[in-house]
Image: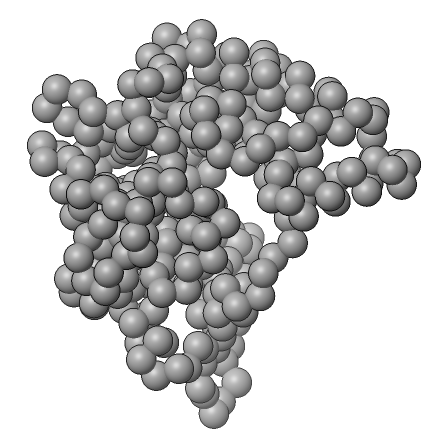
Amino acid sequence: MTTTLEPPVTAPVVIDGMTAENYHADKTSISSSGLRALLNPGCPAQFKYDRDHQQPPKREFDLGNAVHTKVLGEGHDIVEIDYPNYLKADARAARDEAYASGKVPLLPKEKAQVDAMEQAVREHPLAGPLFTLGTGIPERSIYWTDPDTGVRCRVRPDWLKQLPGTTLCVDLKTIKDAAPDTISRAIRDHNYHQQDPFYIDGIEAAGLAPEGCRFIFVFISKIAPYLITVRELVDQDRDIGRARNQRALRIYAECESTGIWPDWTGPVTEIPQIGMPSWDTLRQAEEYLR
């Protein structure tokens, strides 16, 4: 079902045309990034503060947002700032005006880089066909209710593409280096193995994948020649990610119910101990305590 109304309390719903700003500002549901922020190294207290206080634009996201817009054909408006850098006050004023209007400011050299990255996607033998304009739907907002906790959830797939027998959820990510080893570490560091099953669960709950959904990562390097790696997550990591999501959903439901958003320590009366990371403890114990 597709509608332009606000999502109801319990039924799954798909919303076309919702702005990214409205989607991210929603406090009645939780997103994949929110679930990830609830778990270590984050904590509920930090999640609650960040949710309740609008964060200023981060320049490091400008390139990724612009690449998304170019590749998906939908997203933030791009404004080219006709200066070589932001050293001059006029350049900074133009940049800040773009941010205030919800647009992405790019210097000419950055705009050229974004155009080259889009071209790299179009010409890639795997990514190009996945993102062929007109063959998928970008930036749909999907809401559903987790049956175990009653928590309202939301996802916003970059690109939904119907194929015979399956639905593809294609996620485009910019990364400094698209080498597979670097991507593996990024999956661990950013908990992308939580995003994968959460999006699959939401898409299937909304009835958009009656024959099942596959989540596809497309990583593009920010360094010329803008190499691209397309991958699917291994099953075990997806299972781990889904288990992490379930724990985060329980934490979120408890915090919403009680109004208590604990930090990393929680209510204790004794000072806890702390040590080095386990690997360093084992390494140094072997060297110094044997």
Residue 134's image quarter?
A: top left
Give coordinates of residue 148: x percent, y percent.
Answer: 16, 65
- Rendered position, 253 above or below 170: below
In the displayed structure image, the side of residue 238 where residue 103 appears, left or right: right
Give coordinates of residue 79: x percent, y percent.
Answer: 67, 30
Give coordinates of residue 109: x percent, y percent.
Answer: 73, 20
For the point 42% across and 34% down, which residue is it? 184
Give coordinates of residue 180: x percent, y percent.
Answer: 43, 25
Front residue of 153/22: it is: 22
The N terminus - image quarter: top left
For the point 22% across and 50% down, which residue is it? 13
In the displayed structure image, the side of residue 197 where residue 34 appears, left or right: right
For the point 62% across and 38% down, which residue is it? 103
Residue 160 shows up from this direction: yes
Residue 132's image quarter?
A: top left
The residue at the far bottom in this view is: 269
In the displayed structure image, the side of residue 192 where residue 289 appears, left or right: right
Residue 63 shows up from this direction: no
- Rendered position, 155 above or below 26: above
In the displayed structure image, the side of residue 279 where residue 146 appears, left or right: left
Front residue of 195/4: it is: 4
